[in-house]
Image: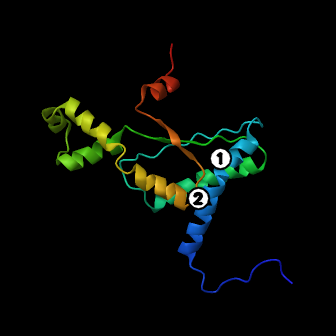
Amino acid sequence: MSRYAPVDPKQSFPALEERVIERWREGETFRRQLELRAGRPLWSFYEGPPTANGKPGSHSVLARVFKDIYCRYKAMCGFEVPRKGGWDCHGLPVELEIEKELGISSKEEIEAYGIVEFNRRCRESVFAYVGDWNRLVERIGHWIDLDDPYVTMETDYIESVSIVT
């Protein structure tokens, strides 16, 4: 007699997904895994964070899955693997999104609009889709800490990666 239940040929995969997510939530599985590895040899993984002012796409799923595989493997090998998520808040993707919203496309038009106001709009847009990203992370089972993310536009982050000479 098999110790496994028979496979349901009419399995609802969305329902199965919800059950697994709920079990991980209730059991605080990710937090417990981190606690069990605390104090063990450290294995670091620096995530290249997404820009949260754009919606995640299929390429986002693939990148997140690969990032998660390495961290889980090293944790299963007994390493402490902190996984702090973050948000890239500057650069071309942010600027292009605001240019598109404003209907402009040149440096001169940005200057005419006002650099201070343009930068303010960029900062405001950065977290437009964080909720979508958080749902994606949970649905694909990516174990990463998004409760206290690093944010590349915050002074603490900027100072932590700056080289002082």
Image label count = 2
Residue at 77% over, 37% down: 40
Residue 139 shows in this picture: yes
- Residue mark closest to the camera, 1 vs 2: 1
- Residue 164 is situated, as x and y percent measured from the top left of the image, at 50, 15
Q: Is residue 8 left or right of residue 18?
A: right
**Which residue is at 48% across, 29% downward?**
157
Q: Is residue 165 above or below residue 158?
A: above
Q: Nearer the viewer, residue 149 or 15?
A: 15
Label disc, if present, on residue 157 of the rendered structure: none
Q: Position of residue 89 (x, y in %)?
A: 39, 38
Q: Residue furthest right?
A: 1
Amino acid type, residue under disc 1 in the picture: Arg
Q: What residue sits right under mark 1 in the picture?
A: 31
Residue at the outermost top position? 165
Density class for disc 2 (Cα within 10 Å; few <14, some 14-19, many ≥20) is some
* Residue in view at x 60 percent, y 55 percent: 66
Helix, strand or loop under label 1:
helix
Is residue 21 positioned above or below 41 on the image? Answer: below
Q: Residue at x 53, y 57 (%)?
A: 138
Q: Position of residue 102 (x, y in %)?
A: 18, 46
Which amino acid type is shown beneath numbered disc 2?
Gly
Label located before the other in sequence (1 or 2): 1
Is 12 on the left or on the right of 34, as rendered? left
**In the rendered image, which residue does mark 2 sit on?**
141
Q: Tell me the SS state at disc 2.
A: loop
Q: CA distance from mark 1 to mark 2?
A: 13 Å
Classed neighbour count for the residue bearing mark 1: other residues with Cα under 10 Å, few (<14), some (14–19), many (≥20): some
